[in-house]
Amino acid sequence: MNMKFTLGWVGLLSLTLGWAQDGKALFQANCASCHAINRRVVGPALKGVHERWGGDEAEMIKFIQNSQAYINGNFKNSAYAKNLYEQYNKAVMTAFTHLTAEEIRAILAYIKSEAEAMAAAASSPGAGKPGAGGAVSGTPSEVSPLLWVLVIVLGAIALTLLVTTLALRRMLQPQTIPPTPTVWTRMGQAMRSRRFLALVALAGFLWLTNATIKKARSVGLHKGYKPVQPIAFSHKTHAGEYKIACQYCHVGVEKGKSATIPSTNICMNCHAYIQEGSRYGTKEIAKILESYEKGRPIEWVKVHNLPDFVYFSHAQHVKVAGLACQTCHGPVEEMEEVYQYADLSMGWCINCHRQTKVDLTANPYYARLHERLKEREVTVEKLGGLECSKCHY
């Protein structure tokens, strides 16, 4: 009976951990909003995706983690990926850099198994007919998360009943002088005690809650995102070695919401005379000259992306507040290729507003209010910096 109890507990814990790492759960959390197995949604139907990619999961993993880098790069299936990008109106797929290769393989395995199940259901007699005793043909069966919760609750009830039955059986047995228990016996009794089981259950619940919170908070954050650019531009060379000011290229940083991406004309201010670089020679500068001669802009890939409902003004932070570019973008002058330095989450912005002190002497607007302020130090938070409408439409 003790062995059955131990195996039952291990099985219940394995079921919970397996559910947390299930490919279906990963698919629902990351893919279901834009893709379906058997029909086109925002993106193509995923049935048969292995055949379309030649069964090469390594290439599929690269594409899923960073589709734009794969399209613009020189990979095995870059031509197919670019054609797919054009076919679906150049809709940019989210970069899933937070997913590991193992998690993506679990998603691909789930897609393959669902597609095979649909094919088997479609070929079986009476498939898709009303009243045939199953789901409509072509629609994947969906298991509600509530069903998993119900399974766990029923398992806990069964475990409680088992412990109660064992306790009652010991109470009804005739009283005999038990032998002196060994160390292993005492350890087994301690591990079967209610306190120990409650402690294990609590630890498992806390671990699962923490993992869920971390996973949920990482959705939409792309810290470390570094796409492949059409030209190998080195910020380390331009901003670091040659000390070119950020405002020289990003001319809108003190005038409006966007810092703006530099046009080819700005590049030509220097490269009309400098046509050979210290790092890449003439190869990359030739692309700038070609863009200028053909009148075709360079298609730079945007690195820092905020949600559409977020309002952010570069002029307000750079011109009025006097913040350095490195405050948000990190040491750009040391980056060979620019990447997203901070996570740019709402909490990150709020902490900056709470800690940043306002200079009341350098701005005429604050000079007019200075006499009416009684506090010696004023933060952005005290000026309404934490109001939702300041950043959200």
Image (tube, rainbow, N blue to C red):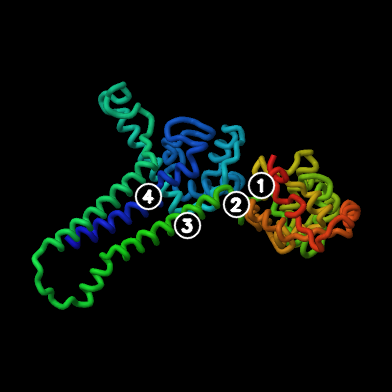
Report which quarter residue 331 is drawn in.
bottom right
> Which is more foreground, mark 3 or mark 1?
3
Name the residue carrying label 3.
210
Are there few (<14), some (14-19), or many (20+) residues within 10 Å of tag 3? Answer: few
Residue at 50% x, 53% y: name it: 213
User: Which of the two labelled residues, at mark 2 and mark 1, occupies the earlier sequence position?
Assistant: 2
Residue at 22% x, 77% y: name it: 183
Label number found at residue 19: 4
Q: How far is mark 2 from mark 1, CA to CA?
A: 9 Å
Name the residue carrying label 2.
222
> Which is more foreground, mark 4 or mark 1?
4
Q: How far is mark 4 from mark 1, CA to CA?
A: 32 Å
Res. 267 visible in picture? no
> Which is more foreground, mark 2 or mark 3?
3
Q: Which of 170 and 327 is in front in this view?
A: 170
| Callouts 2 and 1 close, C-beta under 8 Å | yes
| Callouts 4 and 1 close, C-beta under 8 Å | no
User: Which of the two labelled residues, at mark 3 and mark 1, occupies the earlier sequence position?
Assistant: 3
Q: Answer left or right for 235 relative to 57.
A: right
Name the residue carrying label 1.
305
Check disc 2 and give the amino acid type. Answer: His
| Callouts 2 and 4 close, C-beta under 8 Å | no
